[in-house]
Amino acid sequence: MSSLDQVSNTANVTDDDALETQEWLDALEAVLDREGPERAHFLLERLIDLARRSGAHIPFSPNTAYVNTIPPGLEPPHPGNIVLEERIRSYVRWNAMAMVVKANSHHPHDGGDLGGHIASFASLATMIGCGQNHFWHAEAEDHGGDLVYFQGHSSPGIYGRAYLEGRLTAEQLDNFRQEVDGKGLSSYPHPKLMPDFWQFPTVSMGLGPLMAIYQARFLKYLHARGIADTSKRKVWVFCGDGEMDEPESLGAISLASREKLDNLIFVINCNLQRLDGPVRGNGKIIQELEGDFRGSGWNVIKLIWGGYWDPLLARDKEGILRRIMEESVDGEYQAYKAHDGKFVRENFFGKHPKLLEMVSRMSDEDIWRLNRGGHDPYKVYAAFKAASEHTGQPTVILAKTIKGYGMGHIGQAKNPTHQQKKLDMASVREFRDRFNIPVPDDKLEQLPYFKPADDSPEMVYLHERRKALGGYLPARRRKADEHLKVPGLDVFKAILDPTAEGREISTTQAFVRFLNQLLRDKQLGPRVVPILSDESRTFGMEGLFRQIGIYSPEGQKYVPVDKDQVMYYRETENGQLLQEGINEAGAFSSWIAASTSYSTNNRIMIPFFIYYSMFGFQRVGDLAWAAGDMQARGFLLGGTAGRTTLNGEGLQHEDGHSHILSSVIPNCVSYDPTFAHELAVIMQDGLRRMVENQEDVFYYLTVMNENYAQPGLKPGDEEGIIRGMYKFKSVGDAKQPRVQLMGSGTILREVLAAQELLQQDWGIASDAWSVTSFTELRREGLDCDRHNLLNPESKNPMVPYVTKQLQDTSGPIVVSTDYVKAYGDQIRPFIPKGRGYYVLGTDGYGRSDFRYKLREHFEIDRHFVVLSALRGLADEGKLPVSKLSEAIKKYGINVNKANPHHA
């Protein structure tokens, strides 16, 4: 019977004419044999198309049989020394296990367990070893280096191999997850904590797959624009099958196929278990994922069965074994490897008497030895080679493995395996014997790491393989080799000058002018990466379509409907602008790829991602945190920012808290400028820090769509703008009661209007301060506090910048912003003692209305600034309280309305 007939018999369909069936199958086999699979595929597609057009209902099925995609006869020979590779792999397994178990056996009495994971790497070891020995190139003169997103929980195994390579010491392994004193190793891949080692943070599930897709696309982008030769480079992504439940994991796979990212390889470690139990206990995760990826246009390689199954499958003439493989669910497959050979005989092969007969001459040990594809070095090599040579599509390898492989009676394939971080001595001994580790019984309790002699065959081979691939991985570049010069502030003079009489612009327009000026710079212009999530016209950036083009690997195959317009929609193969569609997470991932290009590509890029501010840190906050971990450098711009500025869009579009969210990321420098000149000063300084000095910071700026006259830069204000506050305007004389007024963003204009009302209606003098960043002021103040705490006897204690600016002023201090009160409240500890500090903010949910109505509703407008100033003076005894009642009546303030900050 033919091999095609074996597959056909796996379906529970009655064959009413076996002879006719055999004739069709024989004909197809003849085509396969003489003309190849491509011709056979063409004929099958034509037959299916004809049947459908004739009215036959033939549902699409993206699934193939539950066997390996690459049949044994097409497997390439393995080029390495299998024996040495197995020994190296075993030593890595041992060191990874010992490191985690030791970390949780000798902890301080008050420290608790340090945690750690053994089981994930145990299932991945063969695949990681194969990649390290044969596929993953390090950065070298003739190769930009492959990028590997390691499965986060596998970090102990990566450390275990780096120890063999001499890149990590035993002391560092002894300090796994003990980082405070600077000697330890981070729990998971964290570039911030190990800046010369890890490239990508991957343990926040789903972000690794998402970021990797856009990373692979960015390599294509760099190549298309002639900035770097990335033609040889691959992006390898290791994910868990449980991780694929995260929406981010599968959310961008259609982009990868649409743009033909054949430099992208996913390896999904299908050990069938997530943290608490089976991934698909009642189904088959490999079949489900095959449908997802194949349906999205990916090349799918299934790596299910190891070589010990090949003879059984070859003898499966009636297809019974394949049918049972297909019908068994993952919950059963997990159980088969949690027990023993006898259990497998009875519960798997026992499902059909002919299968029992098939294995009747096999011992229970022989049955137990039947391996899974992800643990077979020959099968793994074949799958990796096929994936790395495939063109025109991204590839996913669905590799079946065993969670906790080799961890013995308490670890392998059990539900608690993921959390397993301690092994009893019986399990340690079993582990040692299983992998033939040369550690004697009397040393077992010490769990010593094992490293062969430097001149041993294993060590010589290990170093030779990495030398052939250009060096060691993972490894991270801290600084780019290139040095770029940033234009001086004077280059942006058009943005620094006051607007002409009668002209009004928004800070968003000011940003676009800044960007256009930067694009004209001969050195930096090509490095600018504008990124949009389908809101170009909202931000007035549609002019860039024609100016620099939208990146599209296929160019533009159609005539755009607005071709007759000056700013028509232009896509081009070497376009500079990344238009990501309605997809903030994808756009942010592109921004991360560009903002870390100095490290991954040795090319400094300058990304600008502008978006609705409400959909930035709120929607993609986890990615923003990952960007901080990766030491990103670039600009994020929260457009149409503030709770009341985007006035007609309602609750879900109005941002009053993005600056609170950004403030928790230590290397995110954030500003809320009011005026165009402030924006220009901040951004030019940001370029200096990130591009010229290569500092590991990134910027978040909020920009608004509200138009008003721009006053221009007054010389000397630059320092205050960058540090976070400067005195913008003073009104009144020394004889009048005085207050200090602070504001940021568009609400500074309400503060300035309140300044005039205080003078005109109440005879009160005031100083108005433009606060460009409450967050940066707070950080500087906290630094001063810490210094003073640790240097109690210093004769020159540090004074926070806020305190310095306010200490020679008088009167209460009133703050109003378009953000929640916590934003303005950040600097309260640094206000000079004895001064009243009153903060207005937009706590509560947003809603739609005119701006003036919203500002009145949230009690941040000019009238509430005046009321708060009067209250401050009354609290100081400089005004009677009755003045507040007068103001309430004068300005028509409704004292009976519901509290807007609770609704």
Image (cartoon, helix red, strand yellow):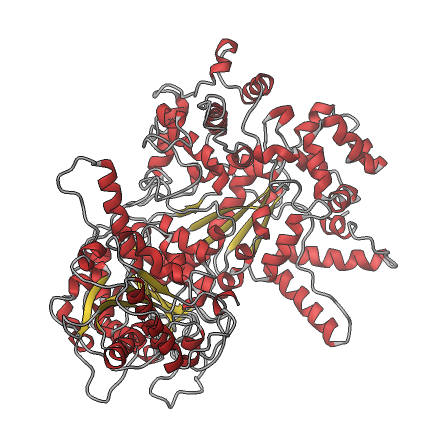
Residue at 42%, 32% in the rendered image = 177
Residue 861 lies left or right of residue 312; in this view the side is: left
Establish if 362 lies above or below 195.
above
Establish if 611 lies above or below 97.
below
Q: Position of residue 12 (x, y in %)?
A: 82, 53
Q: Nearer the viewer, residue 880 or 296?
A: 880
Residue at 44%, 73% in the rendered image = 534
Residue 616, picture quadrant: bottom left
Residue 18 lies left or right of residue 425; in this view the side is: right
Residue situated furthest top in the rendering: 442
Residue situated furthest right in the rendering: 16
Q: Nearer the viewer, residue 23 or 218?
A: 218
Establish if 152 lies above or below 634.
above
Q: Position of residue 858 (x, y in %)?
A: 43, 72
Residue 91 lies left or right of residue 11; in this view the side is: left
Q: Nearer the viewer, residue 474 or 759?
A: 759
Residue at 21%, 36% in the rendered image = 792
Q: Position of residue 720 (x, y in %)?
A: 18, 62
Q: Nearer the viewer, residue 521 or 750?
A: 750
Q: Position of residue 477 (x, y in %)?
A: 29, 45
